[in-house]
Image: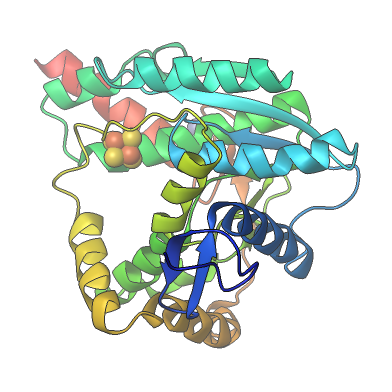
């Protein structure tokens, strides 16, 4: 039996190739929680008295965020609420909503479900069944951001916490490099503060936790999570980039951390390069913050309405 390099007593459940640590269940749980709480302090993600709205899909990442932020909630350091977005994906989203509800109820935390249908009078299934011009994730991302932002303002949240992990973040960095979307890189980081005060600050407490460890954490903590994959995720460029990074990580276990550290060093220069006077206005249709006359959610929504009428 291999014993834990930290306590020297219990059986190992994980070997962390990037750090050389071999940990037992208890030391892994404790070490992971400490790491996330340390990152929250280091990057100043949360202030005492914040109301944090957790975007809770019921998947492993958001359930882990909720589990760890609950320590701060229980100590009355923060107030907390949760929101689940129902995109209208039949046979997929229902289970996630159920699991999210169960966790919020178990912890006694306010929980709201907001669906695409009520906000945009359509579902993602209907959009994909029509002759829509873009991929599912493009509509989904834009509509989801719109809902999250509006919901956060409605409940008076000062921060929105999402479950982005180390794999998600390195994928986003690489995808934007590869596609030449350099200005998009200025919006990647542990904490996103927008130029418009109408946008609530977004934080990513799991940004330095590899996806594999998120999976192991929820198993070790015996937390129920929604495991099914989204039926629309298969054809995404993100998936290909993710596979590429995973493959590299086999022989270069620190590659995701070095990608992240390198990017964080480069980011101030990119931000400087793209710094310009820029005033966010308000969308003439919905009143949400918008870089142009209309926000992207309203542009997409109008396009879909026109498609419907032309059928
Ligand atoms: Fe939405 Fe794409 Fe995620 Fe599915 S994979 S939930 S369509 S962003
Ligand atoms: Zn709008």
User: In this rendering, would 106 be left or right of 258?
Assistant: right
Q: Residue at horizontal 39%, vertical 13%?
A: 117
Q: Quadrant of the N terminus?
A: bottom left
Q: Is residue 308 above or below residue 162?
A: above
- Farthest residue toward the front? 1
- Above or below, 85 against 29 in this view is above
Residue 63 vs residue 234, the one in the foreground:
63
> Residue 28 in the image: x percent, y percent?
57, 58
Above or below: residue 127 compared with residue 64: above
At 19% from the left and 50% from the top, the residue drawn is 236
Q: Front-most of 97 and 221?
A: 221
The residue sitting at 16% across, 31% down in the picture is 132
Horizontal side of 235 relative to 191 (left or right) equals left
Image quadrant holding the C terminus, namely: top left
Residue positioned 61% across, 17% down in the render: 112
Q: Is residue 14 visible?
A: yes
Where is residue 49 drawn, in percent x and y? Answer: 90, 42
Q: Name the residue nearer the viewer: 282 or 15.
A: 15
Front residue (pair 123, 286):
123
């Amino acid at each position: 039996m291999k014993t834990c390099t930290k306590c020297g007593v219990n059986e190992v459940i994980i070997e962390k190739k990037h750090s050389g640590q071999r940990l037992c269940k208890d030391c892994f749980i404790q070490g992971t929680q400490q790491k996330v709480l340390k990152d929250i302090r280091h990057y100043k993600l949360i202030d005492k008295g914040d109301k944090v709205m957790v975007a809770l899909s019921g998947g492993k990442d958001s359930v882990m965020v909720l589990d760890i932020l609950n320590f701060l909630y229980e100590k009355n350091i923060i107030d907390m609420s949760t929101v689940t977005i129902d995109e209208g994906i039949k046979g997929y989203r229902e289970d996630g909503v159920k699991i999210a509800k169960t966790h919020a109820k178990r912890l006694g935390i306010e929980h709201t479900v907001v669906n695409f249908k009520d906000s945009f009078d359509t579902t993602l299934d209907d959009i994909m069944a029509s002759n829509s011009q873009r991929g599912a994730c493009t509509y989904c991302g834009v509509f989801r951001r719109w809902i999250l932002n509006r919901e956060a303002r409605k409940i008076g949240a000062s921060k929105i916490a999402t479950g982005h992990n180390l794999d998600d973040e390195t994928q986003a960095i690489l995808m934007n490099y590869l596609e030449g979307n350099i200005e998009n890189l200025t919006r990647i980081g542990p904490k996103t503060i927008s130029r418009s005060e109408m946008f609530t600050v977004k934080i990513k407490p799991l940004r330095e936790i590899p996806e594999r460890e998120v999976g192991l954490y929820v198993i070790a903590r015996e937390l129920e999570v929604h495991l099914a994959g989204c039926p629309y995720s298969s054809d995404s460029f993100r998936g290909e980039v993710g596979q590429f990074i995973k493959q590299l990580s086999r022989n270069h276990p620190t590659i995701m951390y070095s990608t992240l550290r390198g990017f964080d060093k480069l980011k101030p220069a990119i931000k400087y390069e793209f710094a310009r006077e820029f005033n966010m206005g308000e969308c003439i249709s919905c009143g949400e913050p918008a870089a142009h006359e209309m926000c992207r959610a309203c542009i997409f929504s109008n396009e879909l309405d026109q498609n419907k009428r032309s059928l």
